[in-house]
Image (cartoon, helix red, strand yellow):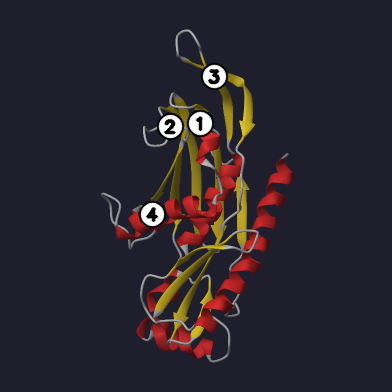
């Protein structure tokens, strides 16, 4: 009976739970799903991490390559994120070039890298105007059940904290790069941005960490990215129901709590393997 009701009237099905201040999966309205982080999941990458947020699973691999700095920024390196939402993660995605959601997610990640100061691109410069590191951060969703932005942000942060680069110098006579694979160093992580996503139901009810079905039924979605110093470095709201200043401040406060919890989770995982 419940399964038939859910299929025939999904919105009313969810409303029946929300009236009791709970959700179909048993969570309270402001509750995030169980989050797990696995560091160093890809042995061939320079850094990697796998994140599970409920059933949503994202893996991130960081591949470092030597490159020439740009003429406009001779003292900087590059960080290039790319989000892939393949058909294997959900039937809603199709084969072929990246769809609109994947492109938007990739741009979201690029904006976070720039606004959060998680990593200074100056630190990726090996020799000004001659040689720098280019970090290709490939994020693939293995299982999609909503809120991929939070999972991608966490996977990227964990993978960057796991990244180790070999020592590189430039030969003064030949100008060729000299790589010492025996000596490696980690990246200088400045800030720890964490995304916290919410959706709006019936223009008033706020749900944290929405599932794929909740995203489809919501009247609006919002993602707040905060650093450990409490600074909001991004607010992403692609249309939908407007939110009052009071509601927005409430979500920012929840996001700050989520940032602290997630930061502690990553540090705990890293300490357990070192």
The C terminus is located in which quarter? top right
Vertical order, 231 against 222 (above or below): above
**Horizontal and vertical percent for residue 153?**
51, 55
Residue at the far top in the pictured view: 173
Going from the N terminus, do you reach mark 2 or mark 1 first? 2
Q: Indicate the position of residue 54 as horizontal and vertical percent values.
A: 55, 64
Q: Residue at x 45, y 29 (%)?
A: 65
Q: Which residue is mark 2?
A: 74
Q: Is residue 24 visible?
A: no
x then y, percent, for residue 154? 55, 54
Label annotation for residue 169: 3
Q: Nearer the viewer, residue 168 or 1?
A: 168
| Sequence-first tag of 1 and 4 | 4
Q: Between residues 155 and 185, which one lies in front from this camera angle?
A: 185
Q: Earlier in the sequence, mark 3 or mark 4?
A: 4
Q: Residues within 10 Å of mark 2 (few under 14, many from 20)?
A: some
Sort mark 3 into few (<14), some (14-19) or many (20+) by Cα contacts within 10 Å: some
Q: CA distance from mark 2 to mark 4?
A: 23 Å
Which residue has dot 1 on it?
Answer: 125
Asked if residue 168 is positioned above or below residue 79 in the image, the reply reads: above
First in sequence: mark 2 vs mark 4: 2
Q: Measure how far apart labels 1 and 4 are at the Cα level.
A: 23 Å
Q: Does residue 130 appear to the left or right of 229 in the view shown?
A: left
Q: Is residue 107 left or right of residue 252?
A: left
Q: Which residue is mark 4?
A: 107
Label whose residue precedes the other's in the sequence (3 or 2) = 2
């Amino acid at each position: 009976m419940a399964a038939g009701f859910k299929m025939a009237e999904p919105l009313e099905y969810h409303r029946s739970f929300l009236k009791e201040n709970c959700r179909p999966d048993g969570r309270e309205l402001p509750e995030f799903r169980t989050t797990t982080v696995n560091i160093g999941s890809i042995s061939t990458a320079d850094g990697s991490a796998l994140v599970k947020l409920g059933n949503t699973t994202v893996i991130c691999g960081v591949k470092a390559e030597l490159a020439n700095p740009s003429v406009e920024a001779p003292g900087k390196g590059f960080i290039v994120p790319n989000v892939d939402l393949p058909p294997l993660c959900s039937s809603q995605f199709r084969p072929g070039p990246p769809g609109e959601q994947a492109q938007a997610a990739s741009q979201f990640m690029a904006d976070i890298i720039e606004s959060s100061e998680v990593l200074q691109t100056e630190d990726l410069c090996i020799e000004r105007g001659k040689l720098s590191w280019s970090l290709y951060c490939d994020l693939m969703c293995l299982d999609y059940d909503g809120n991929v932005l939070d999972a991608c942000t966490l996977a990227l942060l964990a993978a960057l904290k796991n990244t180790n680069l070999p020592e590189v110098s430039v030969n003064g006579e030949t100008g060729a790069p000299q790589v010492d694979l025996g000596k490696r160093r980690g990246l200088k992580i400045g800030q720890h941005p964490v995304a916290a996503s919410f959706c709006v139901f019936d223009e008033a009810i706020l749900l944290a960490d929405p599932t794929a079905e909740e995203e489809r039924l919501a009247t609006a979605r919002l993602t707040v990215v905060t650093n450990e110093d409490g600074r909001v470095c991004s607010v992403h709201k692609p249309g939908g129901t407007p939110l009052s200043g009071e509601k927005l401040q409430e979500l920012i406060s929840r996001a700050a709590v989520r940032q602290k919890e997630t930061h502690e989770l990553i540090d705990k995982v890293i300490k357990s393997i070192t």
